[in-house]
Image (cartoon, rainbow, N blue to C red):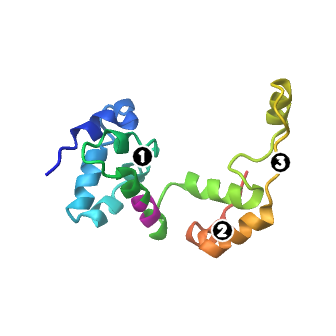
Amino acid sequence: MFTMWNVYRSSPVSKVTQGKYNPRKNILAVYFGYKDQVLEEEDFVIWGCTSCDTCDEMCPQHIKLSETFTYLKNESIALGRGPDSVRYQAKAIYECGKVIPRQVAIERRRKQLGLPKVVDPDIKEIQTLLRGLGIDKKVGIETLKLD
């Protein structure tokens, strides 16, 4: 059996939460067949992963652990779970083409920094892609209201 201590020690979220988030525990549970129990835990157990890929880089066995976390997040959404923030981000992308909609303050700051204007995404194309993937139904986009 490979050691996973580096995964636990290297996780920035584990450090910030003083060990409350434990990627090692989650990975071992999944690999030993306890995926359903992990999916029944509070959202933070799965969604605490920031997808920084540090665990992939630190794993001495070169296992793509971040893929397991992505899988768990996808399974969580398929089960109708997961944090509301994920659904709201998906809704924003569906309606605006990006997570943070265009804002006057951001455009003003970009101009001050000498950056070019941001080209608006093709929202219809994005919506077509998301509908084709079934994302609109998986996260319940039609029932959410953006503030």
The CA distance from mark 1 to mark 3 is 31 Å
Label 3, on which residue?
A: 119
Query: Which tag, 1 or 3, sits closer to the chain's start?
Result: 1
> Residue placed at 76% from the left, 66% from the top?
125
Secondary element type, mark 1: loop
- Dot 2 amino acid type: Leu
Q: What secondary structure is found at the residue carrying circle 3? A: loop
- Relative image position of residue 8 (x, y in whole percent): 28, 39
Residue at (39, 37) in percent of width and height: 13
**Can you give x and y, in whole percent of width and height, for residue 118 in the image?**
81, 43
Cα gap from disc 1 to disc 2, whole angstroms:
23 Å
Based on the picture, tell me whether residue 63 belongs to the magenta stretch: no
| Most foreground residue, 143 or 116 | 116
x, y percent for residue 92: 70, 55
Q: Which residues are magenta?
A: 71-75
CB of mark 1 within 8 Å of CB of mark 3? no
> Residue 87: x percent and y percent?
59, 58
Q: Amino acid at mark 3?
A: Val
Quarter of the image for residue 117 reads top right
Foreground pick, 1 / 81: 1
Q: Does the CB distance between marks 1 and 2 fall below 8 Å?
A: no
For residue 130, the mark is 2
Q: Is residue 28 left or right of residue 68?
A: left
For mark 1, what is the residue?
49
User: Residue 146 shows which numbered tag?
Assistant: none
Nearest to the eye among marks 3 and 2: give it. Answer: 3
